[in-house]
Amino acid sequence: MNANGMPPEDDGEDFEMNTRLTDELYEEMEDNVIGEKVVGLALWEESLADDEENRPEADERQVFDLDLYLENNLYFELYGVLFFTDQDGDPLQGLDRIGTIVAELTDKGVWLDDIAATEEDEMVLILSQNHEPKLYLSVGGWTLNEWETLPDEE
């Protein structure tokens, strides 16, 4: 398991999840998602990274799965995500707290301003307002897909 509780390698046969940010993946995202406005998100109460027998309580949860919808009709399915308000701090904790933070940022307007990699080549999404980072999402695994309808419009 990596720091986000995700398997270190993609071993799913039906489900192709990226777990390392390669140069090729970065270039693809640089062309398609960096600079896009976040127009919606869905934060899940459970995570693929959860230990089946010892799931954390909602107010103690640090690792999340979420869908992040971008204005250009692409969305990330993000797994094993840790949320940080600064690069050197501890991860945020609690479903309600993080839900409130991301909802407020989305309502006020937040952009996927940049993508970085950790020393272990794990992806970090940087969400910003006016090019000022507001939230860092350290991602254990992800897929990138197209969307037609936002979850709250279904």
Image (tube, rainbow, N blue to C red):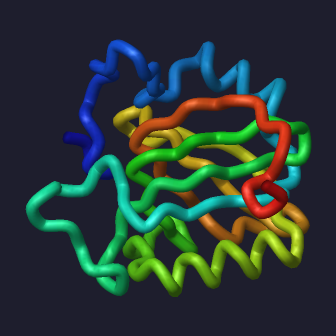
Is 48 drawn above or below residue 23 in the view shown? Answer: below
Across and down, in percent, residue 24 comes to 62, 14
Which residue is located at x 23 percent, y 73 percent?
Answer: 56
- Residue with the most extreme left position: 53
Which residue is located at x 72 percent, y 20 percent?
Answer: 28
Across and down, in percent, residue 22 comes to 52, 20
Across and down, in percent, residue 127 comes to 71, 60
Q: Nearer the viewer, residue 22 or 51?
A: 51
Which residue is located at x 69 percent, y 71 percent?
Answer: 134
- Residue with the most extreme front position: 154
**Left/right of residue 122 with respect to residue 86 in the rendered view:** left
Across and down, in percent, residue 104 comes to 75, 81
Q: Nearer the viewer, residue 120 or 108?
A: 108
Which residue is located at x 25 percent, y 34 percent?
Answer: 7
Q: Nearer the viewer, residue 153 or 15?
A: 153
Quadrant position of residue 40: bottom right
**Left/right of residue 144 with respect to residue 143 in the rendered view:** right
Rendered-image quadrant of the N terminus: top left
Quadrant position of residue 42: bottom right
**Left/right of residue 123 with respect to residue 36 in the rendered view:** left
Is 29 drawn above or below residue 139 in the view shown? Answer: above
Rendered-image quadrant of the C terminus: bottom right
